[in-house]
Amino acid sequence: MIEITSTPIILIAILGTVGAALPIINIARKERGSSSFYGAIAFGALIASIGYVIYQIATEQVAKAAIFSEDVLVDDTFGGLFAIALLIVAILTTVGSFNFMRKQSHTAVYYSLILLSTIGMVLVAYSTDLVMLFVAWELMSIPTYVLAGFLKKDPSSNEAALKYFLFGALASAIIIFGISIAYGLTGSTNIGEVIQGFSTLDSQMIPLALLSIAMFIAGFGFKMGLVPFHMWLPDTYEGSPPTITALLAAGTKKAGFAAALRVIVMGTVALNLDWTFALGVIAVMTMTIGNIAAIMQKNLARMLAYSSIGHAGYILIGLSIAPFSSLGIQGSLFHILNHAVMKGAAFIAVAGIVTTLAITHLDKLKGLGRKMPITSLGLVVCLLALAGVPPLNGFWSKLILFGSALDAGSVVSWAPWLAVAGVLNSALSLAYYAWIIRKMYFEGENEKRVKEPKSVIAVMIFSIIFIVGIGVYPEPILQFTESAVPTLTAILP
């Protein structure tokens, strides 16, 4: 039985208590509380949560390889890595919302929904049971449906929420279908038992098991933004409040990969290693379509949305070659952690630009580097890191991913082509990132500096330190991600 002091239980207690208390406090207060008041409470809860996760990992009180745990939740290094990444995203979103929410109503509910969604995200990473994973998935998703449409007087926000909800409901139904097939074949919803059951199936039952895995790919692929399950993503990211787009792009997207790593990769290995080729094809399609579409955009938020699709393809490289190279999983985990900060901070920069100047069209970004120098610098660092420019953190995670694909070439002939596709797409992404930078710094004249939101400045400073710091000294994160790999490879021969 999972202990009461285990990380997922403590996170539920902290975030759940504060998340439930915020609306109650708002009702009980005679005077309307400020946005910063509720944001500060949410920020404190998130800091306490990430502090506990780091403490548990630093003191080695978490499991190393627990995919076959009998509990529905397991306190392991893999879950801890995702918890840190997701809590960082929630912190960036919360801090970045301080200025943005000053002109909005229902701020207590806003921050409460962020905390409740964060609980769902981290529980997805800690889940070792399919039913628990689905419950966590819905706990993550339902608050974000509301948050996407939080600007209820904005038609684009309403449209974003509606599309997100409809596609999300479809994805949930597909996941339930996959769970039902897995349970019917194995008589269990425990992920470890399901995987073991798949490995001993009669040949006549294997097609049904593959159908179950296909359902999981489609369902989880919706959140991950994989092609062809990405149709909702650009409109939702563009229409949602930009701070919430940061939560979606850098948070819920990563929770989808946590589920995929737990279920899809191991299930594919248990059934047929050759089926990983399908994941490789999806990876190439995702990164290519995402980057080609991004270079055609004129709206900054929409361009970053398509960029997120491209990065889902990079991460999927590691998943597709997981059975053939342990570096593949490590590279995926490293890039997931890096991308959480890079993309989250980039969208918070967009939120700062929208709050201050009310612009997102690329042609109106001329001279932004002089108008908002700190926000612009943070955005530039994020963009260069996303492109994989050394010595920033994105360079190292991409290097490991592409290197692992080349390494796997000794086992499967198609793996090196993933590296080729990754390098070409990274070069393509650098082209449209450079276009944004040119607009900000080399176009426009006599632009006067404006007052930048302090909360956005704080996020930019943190992101610059993180991106440059990890880029210069990646060793601690490399060791951390390496310690999470055995959790996934426990079943591999």
Image: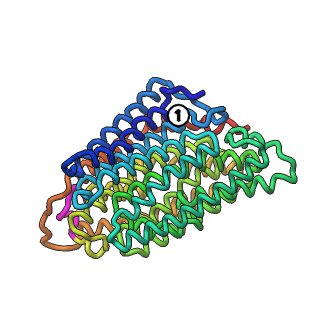
In the image, taking residue 44 as reference, residue 325 lies left or right, namely right
Q: Whole-percent x and y of residue 484?
A: 55, 36
In magenta stretch: residue 371? yes
- On the rendered structure, is 444 left or right of 245? left
Secondary structure, mark 1, is helix
Question: Which residues fall within the magenta stretch?
Answer: 367-375
What residue is pinned by disc 1?
77
Given residues 99 and 199, the one toward you in this image is 99
Which residue is depicted at the point 54% across and 46% down? 136
Where does the image place residue 255, in percent across and percent down from the top left?
51, 49
The kind of residue on which mark 1 rests is: Thr
Q: Quadrant of the N terminus?
A: top right
Numbered label tally: 1
Does residue 124 lie above or below 483 as drawn?
A: below
Image quadrant holding the C terminus, namely: top right
Q: Is residue 258 above or below residue 230?
A: above
**Left of 343 or right of it: where is 168?**
right
Which image quadrant is residue 221 in? bottom right
**On the rendered structure, is 362 left or right of 450?**
right
Q: Please give the name of the residue rendered at 53% of the width and 34% of the height, measured from the top-left corner.
A: 77
Of helix, strand and loop, which mostly describes the magenta segment? helix
The image position of residue 380, as x and y in percent, is 31, 58
